[in-house]
């Protein structure tokens, strides 16, 4: 599999990254280099092998379904790039 | 300046307890030392002198009452990946520049509960993605150790600022995070001790996420004993991290200095890589000889899937990073760059806020997770991880610990590898296996190369058995008698 300049633009769009106009060619080279290096994993026999999760198995912890946090509006908004009257201010997203 | 900062954590806490020195004096001196070193080392990203002095004062009050925790009054440096309440935490990225958390990471909260004093935030590769600390938004960190012709060297990465701060005697310990070697490689490059425990032993809550299944918070220290003290102070179950281990934390400190007689030490043949400097091989052989002399049995072992570890890592880590970093959209926190519509705002924000290496990794992650590729890349890589863990599990039927070099070279010159991503990635060739398998691993300074630069040895042990790692680490430290220090050009 080989990545083209169009692929780079498409991946950037999927990742919500501004189109790297002056670096598209560089990225084509770098991504292909990395992806072809990664291809060697195809040599490994993974037939019947489970995907790794953790080296120490323990049951997924569960907690009581109760409210344990909240009432901290000002803290939540403290780092907002824009806020007003206790709300985040974001660009219009519904036409 | 006094010589207090040359002491170990273990010695300074004894002095604090004996009231021979006050925590406020120590913190004041620490702030002055760091401030003086900053123009030379560029290791720090934020200070908060009021917070530091208030914490030190509280420590003095406790100590005066005969109270105080394990590390009461000791000033510590904190990697810029850990949220410290009220102090800028930017992960060395422009996208988070100015972000001041309103909460505390679990690891730093535990350190403060045990008496640690916040001294400074340290520079790192942006979002912990790098092996040389050159991708930080505040510029490269200089290693306190210079090259043979006085050239500036990398302190390693991603936790380069923390490693430099410990190596330059500007603090009594530091936090780091290790996703592919980001504690152990900088420790090796700076002549310090660096540890990551079993995955889940230290909580990830409140540390900026890079690759969640690989991220391990851990300490940098001047000695193996200090590293055990710091790991003790930061470990333990945390309900806020669902991957945090519920297991009891063993007494790491008690393990330091215990006999290694009769332990079986595995030496994996796959860790002899092409083009590795002879000096790395020599220091490895010395480590083998030291442990043999201390009564260990040396066993040749094979970890056949070692060569697949880095390629697997460069699927898993970018895939998880591309998901984790999706949260930086400029809406709720971080910096926003407006565009003509919502999507354009997202794209402008992320295009301007993330550096080149971070964008490259997000793109690789996005590609390998995109429709139709998940099974071929991510799922296969996760299965290869299982193979790598199985290699270790089979080896640990025959041996108690594995001994390897920590890194394939000594510290290299800044700028010498930044144009070739794969050459940079190869720095982690010996460390990344323990991240993929989630096993305890540490780097201990073991010698110097022909240019007088430090080299480290790595000890890897079975899951949950940090005690054997500390025993072997302390035995290497004792035998190595590593006393080399960089000449002080930063004060």
Image: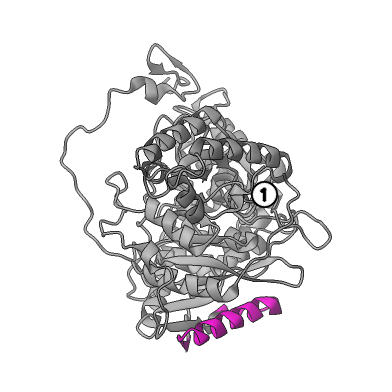
Tell me: B91 left or right of B204.
right
Name which residue lies at 68% across and 57% down: A29
Residue B37, x across and y down, in percent: 69, 42
* Residue A43 visible in the current orientation: no
Let me know if residue B362 is in the magenta part: no
Numbered range of the magenta stretch: B271-300
Residue B85, x across and y down, in percent: 44, 32
Tell me: B96 left or right of B144.
left
Let me know if residue B280 is in the magenta part: yes
The secondary structure type at the circle numbered 1 is loop
| Closest to the observer, B17 or A85 | B17
| Closest to the observer, A1 or B229 | B229
Name which residue lies at 49% across and 26% down: B342
Q: Quadrant of the N terminus of chain B?
A: top right
Tell me: B279 left or right of A10.
right
Residue B349, x across and y down, in percent: 56, 31
Q: How is the image coloured?
A: one colour
Chain letter of disc 1 in the image: B
Name which residue lies at 70% across and 50% down: B142
- Residue B231's place in the image compared with B98, above or below, is below
Residue A17, x across and y down, in percent: 56, 39
- Residue B223's place in the image compared with B474, above or below, is above
């Amino acid at each position: 599999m080989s990545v083209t300049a169009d692929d780079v633009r498409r991946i950037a769009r999927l990742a919500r990254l501004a189109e790297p106009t002056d670096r598209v060619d560089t990225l084509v080279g770098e991504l292909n280099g990395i992806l072809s290096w990664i291809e060697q994993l195809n040599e490994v026999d993974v037939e019947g092998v489970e995907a790794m999760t953790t080296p120490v198995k323990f049951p997924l912890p569960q907690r009581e379904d109760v409210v344990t946090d909240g009432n901290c509006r000002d803290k939540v908004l403290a780092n907002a790039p824009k806020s007003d009257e206790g709300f985040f201010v974001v660009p219009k997203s519904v036409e | 300046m006094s010589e207090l900062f040359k002491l170990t954590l273990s010695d300074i806490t004894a002095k604090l307890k004996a009231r021979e020195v006050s925590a406020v004096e120590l913190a004041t001196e620490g702030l002055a030392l760091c401030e003086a070193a900053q123009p030379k080392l560029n290791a720090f990203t934020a200070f908060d002198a009021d917070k530091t002095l208030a914490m030190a004062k509280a420590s003095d009050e406790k100590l005066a009452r005969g109270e105080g925790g394990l590390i009461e009054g000791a000033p510590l440096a904190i990697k810029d990946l850990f949220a410290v309440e009220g102090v800028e935490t930017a992960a060395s990225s422009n996208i988070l520049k100015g972000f001041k958390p309103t909460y505390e990471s679990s690891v730093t909260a535990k350190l403060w509960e045990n008496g640690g004093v916040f001294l400074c935030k340290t520079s790192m590769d942006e979002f912990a993605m790098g092996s040389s600390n050159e991708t930080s938004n505040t510029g490269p960190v200089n290693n306190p150790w210079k090259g043979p012709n006085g050239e500036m060297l990398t302190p390693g990465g991603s936790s380069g600022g923390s490693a430099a701060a410990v190596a330059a005697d500007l603090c009594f310990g530091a936090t780091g995070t290790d996703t592919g070697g980001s504690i152990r490689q900088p420790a090796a490059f700076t002549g310090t001790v660096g540890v990551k425990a079993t995955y889940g032993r230290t909580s990830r809550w409140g540390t900026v996420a890079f690759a969640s299944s690989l991220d391990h918070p851990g300490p940098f220290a001047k000695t193996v004993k200090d590293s055990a003290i710091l790991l003790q102070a930061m470990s333990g179950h945390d309900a806020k991290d669902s991957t945090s281990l519920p297991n009891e934390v063993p007494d790491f400190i008690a393990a330091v200095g215990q006999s290694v007689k009769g332990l079986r030490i595995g030496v994996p043949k796959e860790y002899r890589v092409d083009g590795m400097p002879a000096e790395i091989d020599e220091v490895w052989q010395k480590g083998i000889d030291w442990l043999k002399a201390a009564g260990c049995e040396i066993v040749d072992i094979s970890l056949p899937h070692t060569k697949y570890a880095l390629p697997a890592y460069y699927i898993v880590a970018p895939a998880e990073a591309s998901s984790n970093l999706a949260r930086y959209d400029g809406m709720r926190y971080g910096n926003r760059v407006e565009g003509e519509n919502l999507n354009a705002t997202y794209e402008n924000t992320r295009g301007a806020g993330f550096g080149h290496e971070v964008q490259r990794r997000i793109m690789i992650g996005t590609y390998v997770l995109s429709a139709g590729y998940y099974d071929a890349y991510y799922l296969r890589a996760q299965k290869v991880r299982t193979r790598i863990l199985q290699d270790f599990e089979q080896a640990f039927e025959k041996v108690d610990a594995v001994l390897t070099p920590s890194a394939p070279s000594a510290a290299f010159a800044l700028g010498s590898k930044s144009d070739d991503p794969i050459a940079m990635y190869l720095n982690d060739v010996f460390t990344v296996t323990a991240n993929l398998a989630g096993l305890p691993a540490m780097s201990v300074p073991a010698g110097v190369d022909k240019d007088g630069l430090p080299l480290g040895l790595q000890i890897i042990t079975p899951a949950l058995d940090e005690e054997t790692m500390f025993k072997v680490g302390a035995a290497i430290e004792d035998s190595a008698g590593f006393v080399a220090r960089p000449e002080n050009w930063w004060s």
